[in-house]
Image (cartoon, rainbow, N blue to C red):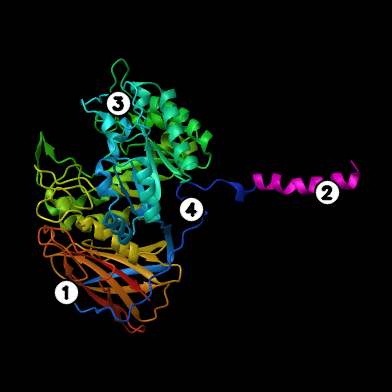
Amino acid sequence: MPLVLFLIGLLLLTPSVQAADSPQAARPKAFELYPATNDAVPTTFTKAAPEFQTDGKPWKFPYGAKVTLKIDASKVLHNVTPYQFGNNASWWSSKTWFMDPDRIEKAKQAGIKFWRWPGGSSSDNYHWDGNYGSHLKDHEGGDPTNMTKPWAVLTDDFIDFCRKTNSEAIFTVNYGVSRYDNVQEAAKLAASWVKHCNIDMKFKVRYWEIGNEVYGNWEEGNKQSGKAQLTGDVYGKDLRVIADAMKKVDPDIYVGAVGVDTDDGGEWTGFFWWMRGLLPELKGKADYLILHQYFMWPFNGDTYLNPTNETFLGNLHKVTDAYSSAGAMVDKYAATEKGIPVALTEFNLVNASPEPEIQLLNGLFTAEVLGEHIKAGYVASNYWDWKNGLDKKLHGDMAMLASDDPSTPDATPRPSYYAYALYSRAFGDKMVASESSDPSVKVYASRFSGGEVGLVVVNENDRNQTVTFDLTGFTAKGKLMGWVLTGKGLNEKQVSWNGEAGPIGGGGPFPIDPIKPYRATYKTEKPLVLPIQAHSVTGIILY
């Protein structure tokens, strides 16, 4: 080869070598880019504020006690993405219910674009392809093959749902099979699922979890005949095998490891030093950690203990506590994993189905959890869940949409639904610094891509408040627009959205898109003073 051609060839090869070693070639952390599916190129998420509606309802509420909200729009705390406003979908919802056009539209109008599948603990019995082999009975005597019967929501149905709602997905693979069979079979099942979704169906599922709450004795395989009690180190070793098999099919996916937030050896707290065993075994194979949070276990035997509203609301600190605890355990047991993202893939008011879950109280609490989890540093969250069913004993429902409830129409949105709708409309792509002079009035502040300030304000009090805004880092134009979730009291099931009430038996109105927002103008040379309603969540955009 002539020397000139050799040199030209060398120059052509050089950039690719440099690119591979450059910082730009480094793989982004989990949940940094959005979206991954629907043939879109993942990029940094940005969000424009909705246009001000001049025909909105006048902002006219009675004034009350004074509260100061301090907002610094120049101080960015965290990026905000649709991953932080997710939900859980389940195979048992039934195909006809789940794929109903009304459900599709309700998902769209709530702004939910991130869905976890196929449904909690049953994930560890779930064989997506319908081939259960000899696993025809779970540890509770149930028939796992029901999960892939024709009436059930199947993987392809769920993909169709995501496409119709323009949503991302996170799948929970069956770790239990590694216990009631072996880890090679678990890896084979998980890898075939990746192939089916990401290659055969051409639907990019970028996020995967290895098992659901597998540290707990309620999970399939946690206590397995002929095998020792499952511990974090065993799970960690298995996770590496399963993750390698999945990433061999699609190297672009991210795999999550099931974690806990308590560092001790108890069976129901630290789960036999779960994190102490797990974290050193990850060895870079897990891309994020998974936590679940139900805040309290209010049972005495099988009898529900009735906490006060103050008790429920007082549990909010556990969002931040759990995140901090997980980080401290990473530092303590596996410093090489420092900075690993943490996702909150299940949460609700409580681990049961009491009436407070379908009362206005949970609408306020859900809004607070959404704000606090972003502030703490979580990269994603998923409410539990989209459909569950009315508990005939405790008279509550963990779901966002009503079912099996004779007092209200099927699929009526519960109060928690509107917390998501508020963030979808009134929260931008950057969380910024904020604080309140009154702990019973919480504020979560954001900035849109155009510089507008988006706020979610939660008033836990049974009286109106007068809010004075101390704003910095923002050039006001003197207009605002807002949406309000409220009701007659924290323990009321019927709620209203911008003054439009839902069914008397419980829940709120739908559709919500046609309901006009509130609007007002204000003088930019003076501090903005705004009344907010009693026991409410208010979303506000300042232009």
Mark 3–mark 2 CB contact (< 8 Å)? no
Q: Would you call the spot at circle 1 few (<14 residues within 10 Å), some (14-19), or many (20 or more)?
A: some
Say which amino acid is labelled 1: Gly
In the picture of the structure, the residue carrying the numbered disc 2 is 8
Q: Is residue 379 visible?
A: no
Instruction: Classify residue 114 as left or right of residue 219.
Output: right
Q: Which of marks 3 and 2 is in front?
A: 2
Say which amino acid is labelled 4: Leu
In the picture of the structure, the residue carrying the numbered disc 3 is 222
For the point 39% across and 28% down, the residue is 235
In the picture of the structure, the residue carrying the numbered disc 1 is 64
Say which amino acid is labelled 3: Asn
Residue 211 highlighted magenta (yes or no):
no
Ranked by sequence position, the earlier of labels 3 and 1 is: 1
Say which amino acid is labelled 2: Ile
Q: Is residue 496 above or below residue 214?
A: below
Residue 4 highlighted magenta (yes or no):
yes
Q: Is residue 328 visible?
A: yes
Mark 1–mark 2 distance (CA, rounded to whole Å): 76 Å
Q: What stretch is highlighted in magenta?
A: 1-20
Mark 4–mark 3 distance (CA, rounded to whole Å): 34 Å
For the point 9% across and 54% down, the residue is 407
Mark 4–mark 1 distance (CA, rounded to whole Å): 42 Å
> Where, by quadrant of the figure, is residue 52 drawn?
bottom left
Q: Is residue 79 above or below residue 538?
A: above
In the picture of the structure, the residue carrying the numbered disc 4 is 33
Tell me the quarter of the image containing the C terminus. Answer: bottom left
Q: Nearer the viewer, mark 3 or mark 1?
A: 3
Find residue 134 and report its horizontal and vertical position in percent.
32, 20
